[in-house]
Amino acid sequence: MSKIEDRLAALGVALPAPKAPVANYVPFVRAGNLVHISGQVSIDADGGIKGVVGVDADLETAQAAARLCGINLLAQMKAATDGDLGRVTRVVKLGGFVQAGPDFFDIPQVVNGCSDLMVAAFEDVGRHARSAVGVYRLPFNFAVEVDAVVEIR
């Protein structure tokens, strides 16, 4: 088990099997040492966190949704590294999308749910550039979606 997986276990995070694509795309693409991971929604074995943030879900729930996205990104990273998260040399960028209600503006704080998990898992290697955007709708009514670019060896 890698140091990253030890940190995740200490946080109580068990990585699920990577989610299969729901349309005509692949879960990740490697280009040189960069892996571009397709957007991961706030889904888990119980169905995940859905709804409009600020209407159906509060900030704390939305942060948990972003954390679920992070867990799903980690599962894809593990698949992209043939099961060895220690091969991740940098989390380069996260792109966060929040299905936000008309009066909800704390988009960056929501996406922190994913960012905080990356830093907890990878420490300084997990510090990344980021976008955090409020959107009208996300696939299947999920509250949050996050994609990523990571560097691997």
Image (cartoon, grey):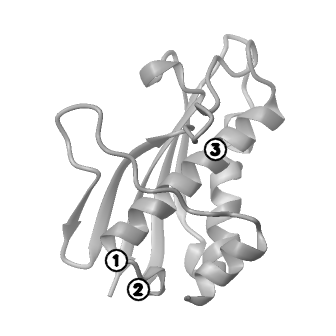
Instruction: First in sequence, mark 3 or 1: give its number.
Output: 3
Q: Amino acid at mark 3?
A: Ala
Q: Return the residue at label 1.
A: 81
Residue at x-position 55% and y-position 88%: 2
Question: Which disc is residue 66 wearing?
Answer: 3
Q: Position of residue 72 (x, y in %)?
A: 50, 53
Question: Which disc is residue 87 wearing?
Answer: 2
**Badge 2 density bin: few <14, some 14–19, many ≥20, Cα 10 Å:** some
Residue at x-position 42% and y-position 71%: 78
**Contact flag, marks 2 and 1 (Cβ < 8 Å):** yes
Residue 153 lies, with reference to residue 142, above or below; the image says below
Q: Place residue 46 in its image quadrant.
A: top right
Disc 1 is placed on an element classified as loop
Left or right, residue 44 beside residue 67: left
**Badge 3 density bin: few <14, some 14–19, many ≥20, Cα 10 Å:** many
Left or right, residue 6 beside residue 47: right
Of residues 110 and 9, the one nearer the viewer is 9
